[in-house]
Amino acid sequence: MADLAVVGGSIVDMAGVARAKYVPAARLDAFHTVGMGASPSWSVFCVDGSIAFTPELGVVGDNRIRIDRGQVRTVEDGVGWAPGDLYLQGGERSPMCGRGVLERAVAAARSAGLEARVGAELECTLLSADGGHASTGPWAPYGVRTSLERSALLVDLTVAAERAGLGIEQLHMEYGQDQLEVSLSPSDPVTAADDVLLARILLGRVAARHGLQVSFSPLPFAGEAGNGAHLHLSLTGADGRPVLGDGPGPHGLTPTGEAAVAGILAALPGLLAVYAGSALSLRRLVPGNWAGAAVCWGLENREAAVRLVAGGPDSAHGANLELKVVDPSANPYLAVAALLGSAAHGVRHELALDAAVDVHPSESGRELPQLPATQAEAVDALEASELARDVLGAPVVAGVAAVRRREVEVFGSLPLAETAEALRLAWSC
């Protein structure tokens, strides 16, 4: 790290925005041991720059952001970054620390006999320097031409990822105009969430070097394609064997795998405000967008909230579950914790799994559970969820509810186009 001049450490607030502090590299030890000060209100900063004060989180007090010097990555010449942990002044982990919440969820899943690996897909939209469309010509979804026209950016991103130690499985221009997708290598749950932040930082910096900006908004432009942040979950049982394949159940699920899927689906309406809770999220989460708007599961069914990805010789990482509802406005630590916690809940309680939906959900002829229809309803469902409080902690549930209710107040009555413009860069790094 002798080539670094500045090192940053970041946390993610309840609105899904990364917030950071930087120090000269010579002060890296202090960042590691005592941390840098941050007001408790950091946790409830809102996407519009306001603060959703709560009785517990206000102007009084201080937290400390600490980083592990062994996790510092080079993100730009002279600049390092590491994920931050949020501590109280007394030295204990803050209940608002997303990494701490996820670490607890991993431990709880392990106590239920589950070991997890997580991989993330990041969708984003390239923008011009002034925040408009990066290109105006015809768009070919997944096209050879559309990717090659951005080949210099893709090459620079690949080099930057290798330099930072970030594993990329694939990258290409996607379905929507100027949309880019990057699939990250699976890892342990905490590292996977860290990698989401690292990837977003690298995407932002590489794009800037090419005169572009990057939007991680769920819906950058009204009426156009939205961005997801799908999570893939692999699970092994106490015997070390995968639970999502080679079993006697439907599509190869084991009994443990069936219970895990059932747990994810049962908890989904109450956790939607964590997975896709922003003022724009539900505008993306509609049938036909392959966003998982139907509360069901199916083998390779991209309209189902939970897609079972088949294992076998053509699968690089074996059978896994893809949660499609997640979008980039989510705090990745809380989203992974919610996913893992709901799967573990299903296993502990041996929940029964409904039959798979192997057609478009609208053609299934079944009465499927419904997701909350509005942002306010999603917040209500979160506050009513016992599982959310158990997995995330009551302080986090209150914090997420506070910032999302603030969004309802500010953006709830605005035209969609105005909200999309206002939040286009809200989650950009």
Image (cartoon, grey):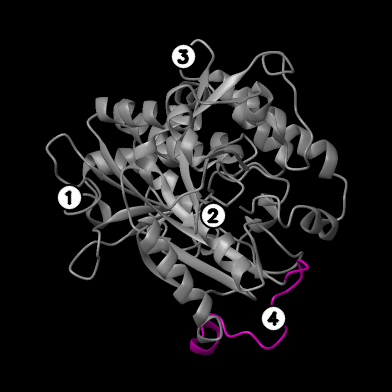
Closer to the chain start, of discs 2 and 4, is 4
Identified by mark 1, the residue type is: Pro
Q: Residue furthest left?
A: 239
In the rendered structure, the answer to whether residue 187 lies left or right of residue 333 reads left
Residue 294 lies, in percent from the top left, at 54, 53
Asked whether the beta carbons under mark 3 and mark 1 sit within 8 Å of each other, the answer is no
Nearest to the observer: residue 296 or residue 159: 159
Asked whether the beta carbons under mark 3 and mark 2 sit within 8 Å of each other, the answer is no
Label 1 – label 4 distance at C-alpha:
50 Å
Identified by mark 4, the residue type is: Ser
Span highlighted in magenta in the image: 129-147
Q: Which mark is residue 248?
A: 1
Quadrant position of residue 238: top left
Asked whether the beta carbons under mark 1 and mark 4 sit within 8 Å of each other, the answer is no
Q: Which mark is residue 201?
A: 2
Closer to the chain start, of discs 3 and 2, is 3
SS at mark 4 in the image: loop
* Front disc: 2 or 1: 2
In the rendered structure, the answer to whether residue 203 lies left or right of residue 401 reads left
